[in-house]
């Protein structure tokens, strides 16, 4: 996996993005605290910014934190997969 510059998608440089060999884009959230719905809305906005630039991108979230069940359902409805480190 290689790191991607988030400014390419008009995002803050503090957001960590990675891309694998099959051109899937991962939003990396490396923290210990639970990912809640507020984070889910923020992830959704990041995904929309990426899709504005690359329409056929597959977007996933890489995280080591537990994800709230409502947030998991919300992100799956938006076609954003959640994967663990």
Image (spheres, rainbow, N blue to C red):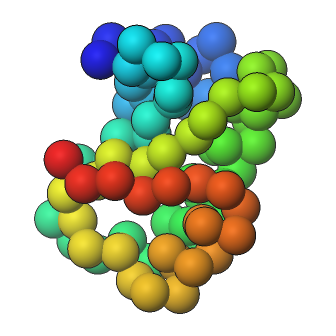
Q: How many marks?
A: 0
The percent coordinates of residue 57 (x first, y second) are 67, 28
The percent coordinates of residue 63 (x first, y second) are 28, 53
Q: Nearer the viewer, residue 84 or 34?
A: 84
The residue at the point 64 percent across, 43 percent down is 46
Res. 10 visible in picture: no
Position of residue 8 in the picture relative to residue 61 (left or right) = right
Q: Is residue 36 above or below residue 14?
A: below
Position of residue 25 in the picture relative to residue 41 (left or right) = left
Q: Quadrant of residue 84?
A: bottom left
The residue at the point 44 percent across, 78 percent down is 36
Outermost residue on the front side: it is 22
In what quadrant of the picture does the N terminus appear? top left
Q: Is residue 59 above or below residue 25?
A: below
Q: Nearer the viewer, residue 3 or 24?
A: 24
Position of residue 46 in the picture relative to residue 37 (left or right) = right
The residue at the point 40 percent across, 13 percent down is 21
Q: Is residue 63 above or below residue 11?
A: below
Res. 81 visible in picture: yes
The residue at the point 81 percent across, 27 percent down is 55
Q: Is residue 13 above or below residue 81?
A: above
The percent coordinates of residue 11 (x first, y second) are 62, 29
């Amino acid at each position: 996996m290689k790191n991607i510059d988030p400014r390419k998608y008009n995002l803050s440089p503090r957001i960590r993005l990675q891309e694998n060999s099959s051109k899937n884009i991962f939003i990396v959230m490396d923290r210990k605290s639970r990912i809640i719905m507020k984070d889910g809305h923020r992830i959704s906005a990041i995904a929309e910014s990426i899709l504005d630039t690359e329409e056929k991108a597959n977007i996933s979230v890489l995280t080591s934190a537990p994800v709230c069940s409502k947030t998991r359902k919300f992100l799956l409805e938006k076609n954003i997969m959640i994967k663990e480190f």
